[in-house]
Image (tube, grey):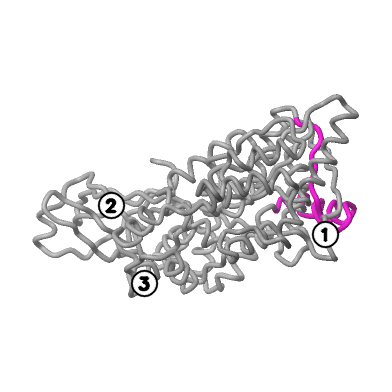
């Protein structure tokens, strides 16, 4: 099988070149061209302009033999996690040859990828590298050789350009939107006739553009408490507080403004918004990563345990007087310290007498950072909601804050009664 992994939103002449190359390889081998087509959300975590069915038709009309949907990933995981999963899926399906495009030589891509693969780094590839995502694909392909004893054979063609400019799906979509859903002649020239016909039909039917479920999204962001927002994947404490401060939301641009205030870039904003739209929890993402991790598909550098151990290490070094940035560098360079991370620990609370009367052992608690930057817990008893700052040693304060900001490490709390009074037991990651 000859494989291509893509959004194809919509299929343009640059994509046709990819399919033509795959067709050439397939005809020589008497094989088929299979498109692994993202469904639900794009690789960049956004709703699609054209739906899955229409994009499938476009790809088949352009010369593909078969379409395989890839779904359930891109509103939950970053590209660093979805790329290994997609490559593994193709290898297990029997894909031998993989076709992609880049504007730098294959030799340079291999050189960059080899360095990252040797270091076991797949999530921190610098943004300034050309064709960064193609480099990631090469590097992960090398990593997965250890599992499958085989890897995809890459065929890289030059990126298709017109008058020196790369054809961009984003630009095509923008021009159509700005032209009141009419396809300008300048854009029509970038599309194969089959895509043009399918796209025009979908526009007439009102199927284009695809949109977010703003009703459910805005309801969650307008009504969820800080603790419940913090339980959504890819929300850090700053994002949660910015969301609460920016209420009430009626438009998507208002939501984006709050994430920008929290320091989120466009890609992470799209991922966090998509996770909120689908109400994706930290536990859900954690379990998904663990599933692929246990199958040997996720590199150790990106394991959930590594994220937890890094948070503990940085909190430990910070308590010794090191800066967080220096501690992160030390961890990346292989220093792990002598202590293993705590996966459960107890915190004190500031409770009023009438709140104490409502407590019961085993009561579930959630965690958040309030507007004054205090670590807090929230619990709902039979008669009231109780919120309380936490009392913790300095190292555990840093550790818990780093876990809250980790985007997908779940935290569970349970009220326990000890001789010295009521405490909240905090569980990290897997249930204990």
Which residue is labeled 3 in the image? 246
What residue do we see at 85% from left, 43% from top? 155
Measured as percent of width and height from the top left, residue 373 is found at: 36, 72
- Tell me: residue 391, above or below residue 96: below
Which sits in the foreground, 349 or 27?
27
For the residues bearing labels 2 and 3, Cβ distance under 8 angstroms = no
Mark 2 and mark 3 lie on one chain; the one further toward the N terminus is: 3
The numbered dot on residue 161 is 1
The numbered dot on residue 330 is none
Mark 2 and mark 1 lie on one chain; the one further toward the N terminus is: 1
Q: Is residue 227 left or right of residue 417?
A: right
Measured as percent of width and height from the top left, residue 122 is found at: 69, 52
Mark pair 2, 1: CA separation: 55 Å
Which residue is labeled 2 in the image? 365
Q: Secondary structure at mark 1?
A: strand
- Tell me: residue 268, above or below residue 68: below
Asked whether residue 96 is drawn in magenta, I would say yes
């Amino acid at each position: 099988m000859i494989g291509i992994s893509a959004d194809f939103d919509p299929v343009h002449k640059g994509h046709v070149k990819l399919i033509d190359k795959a067709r050439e390889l397939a005809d020589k081998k008497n094989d088929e061209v299979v498109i692994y087509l993202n469904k639900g959300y794009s690789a960049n975590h956004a709703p699609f302009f054209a739906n899955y069915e229409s994009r499938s038709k476009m790809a088949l009309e352009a010369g593909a033999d078969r379409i395989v949907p890839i779904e359930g990933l891109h509103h939950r995981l970053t590209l660093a996690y979805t790329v290994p999963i997609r490559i593994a899926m193709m290898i297990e399906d029997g894909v031998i040859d993989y076709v992609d495009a880049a504007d730098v030589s294959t030799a340079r891509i291999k050189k960059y990828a080899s360095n990252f693969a040797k270091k076991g780094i797949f999530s921190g590839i610098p943004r300034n590298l050309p064709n960064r995502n193609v480099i990631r694909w090469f590097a992960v392909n090398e990593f997965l050789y250890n599992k499958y004893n085989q890897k995809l054979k890459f065929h890289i063609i030059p990126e298709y350009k017109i008058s020196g400019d790369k054809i961009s799906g984003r630009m095509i979509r923008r021009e159509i939107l700005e032209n009141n859903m009419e396809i300008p002649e300048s854009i029509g020239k970038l599309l194969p006739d089959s895509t043009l016909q399918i796209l025009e039909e979908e526009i007439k039917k009102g199927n284009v553009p695809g949109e977010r479920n703003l009703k459910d999204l805005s309801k969650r962001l307008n009504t969820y408490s800080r603790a419940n927002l913090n339980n959504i994947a890819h929300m850090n404490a700053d994002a949660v507080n910015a969301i609460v401060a920016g209420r009430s939301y009626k438009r998507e641009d208002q939501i984006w403004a709050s994430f920008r205030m929290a320091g989120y870039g466009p890609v992470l904003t799209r991922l966090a918004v998509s996770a909120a739209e689908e109400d994706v929890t930290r536990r859900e993402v954690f379990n998904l990563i663990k599933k692929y991790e246990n199958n040997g598909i996720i590199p150790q550098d990106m394991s959930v345990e590594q994220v937890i151990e890094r948070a503990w290490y940085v909190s430990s070094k910070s308590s010794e007087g090191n800066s967080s940035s220096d501690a992160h560098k030390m961890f990346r360079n292989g220093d792990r310290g002598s202590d293993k991370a705590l996966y459960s620990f107890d915190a004190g609370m500031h409770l009023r007498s009438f709140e104490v009367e409502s407590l019961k052992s085993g009561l579930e608690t959630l965690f958040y950072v309030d507007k004054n930057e205090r670590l807090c817990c929230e619990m709902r008893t039979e008669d009231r909601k109780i919120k309380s700052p936490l009392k913790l040693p300095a190292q555990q304060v840093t550790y818990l804050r780093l876990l809250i900001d980790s985007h997908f490490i779940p935290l569970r709390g349970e009220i326990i009664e000890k001789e010295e009074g009521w405490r909240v037991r905090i569980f990290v990651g897997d249930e204990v």
